[in-house]
Image: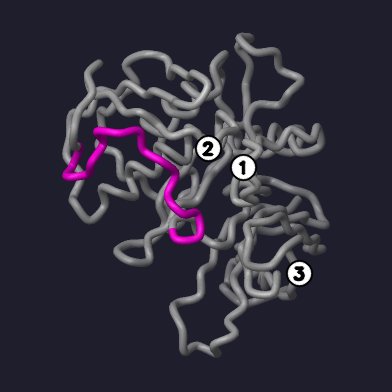
Amino acid sequence: MRRRFGRLGVLAAGLLAAALVGGCTGTSGAGDRGIRDTPAPTSVAPGVQQQRALPVYYVLGEGEQARLVREFHAVWTADPVSGAVAELLGEPPRAPDLRTGWPAGTTLRSPVARDSALVTVDLAVPGEVPPERAALTLQQLVYTVQGAAGTTDPVRLLVDGEPVDTLWGQDVSRPIPRADPYATRLLVQIDDPAEGATVSSPVTVKGEAAAFEATVLWEVRGRDGDVVRSGATTSEEGMRFSPFRFSVPLPPGTYDITVLEDDPSGGEGRPVQQITRRVTVV
């Protein structure tokens, strides 16, 4: 059974919508369209504690198919970067198909520190992570930090206040850079509506994709699993992470909205990447 998520997911979606309307997409000047995370709205003054829609990265899939997927969480904080890291370590994903690689009990020991070209995160890490999951688990942290900060600066990791050479078999003696987004992130992403959101018709779906020829497919299934609507849209650019949106009229009810890649190989290539979010239309 799918886990439902209600009030906070709706709040996060509302904050995200306000951020997008305000034109506050975080960028680093690096020219990578994959860096389109949205930190706190610019209307919120730095240092003022507010609820902010912060990008938090979780893992979808297992083994070679595992990829990072972001959710926007409503977090009450005066420090968006520290707030996003604390959310990553302390809160589960809203969507039931996502998971975190971070061991239970991992905590942020002190506020995230930033200088002109480096972000330092000091953690208490009580548990182990299997070697095959370690690299992507570290990238959860890197992507979350950089998304909340609106930067591509590498992340210097401290454990219990001290630098360490390795963690879970991974070299962390140097600041950790962001891994290639095309090999790390899921290539299709629904940002809005959030999992479990209550929405009105027509339902507007917004997200990002790095899709072949900018083609993004979508379908809507009812509670019985049957497809009730389907179609295609385009992202702003092909083969690079860029925004897409579409609207679909739906009668009241609960639906699963799936966004997926086009498959030019006709099933001969790797598995098609897709993401599904459940919403209720009123």
Mark with earlier residue (3, 2): 2
- The N terminus sits in image quarter: bottom left
- From the top left corner, tell me how far across and down residue 90 is, in percent: 37, 29
Q: Secondary structure at mark 2?
A: loop
Decide if residue 164 is in sight here.
Answer: yes
Dot 1: within a 10 Å radius of its alpha carbon, few (fewer than 14), some, or many (20 or more) residues? few
The answer to whether residue 126 is above or below residue 178 is above
> Residue 30: which numbered mark, if any?
1
The answer to whether residue 204 is above or below residue 111 is below
Q: Residue at 43% of width from left, 19% of height from top? A: 112
**Which residue position holds label 2?**
152
- From the top left corner, tell me how far across and down residue 268 is, in percent: 46, 89
Mark with earlier residue (3, 1): 1
Decide if residue 222 is in sight here.
Answer: no
Q: Is residue 179 magenta?
A: yes
Mark with earlier residue (1, 2): 1
Which residues are the magenta region? Answer: 167-183
Q: CA distance from mark 3 to mark 1?
A: 27 Å
Q: Name the kind of residue labelled 3 in the image.
A: Thr
Q: Name the kind of residue labelled 1 in the image.
A: Ala
Q: CA distance from mark 1 to mark 2?
A: 8 Å
**Which residue position holds label 3?**
233
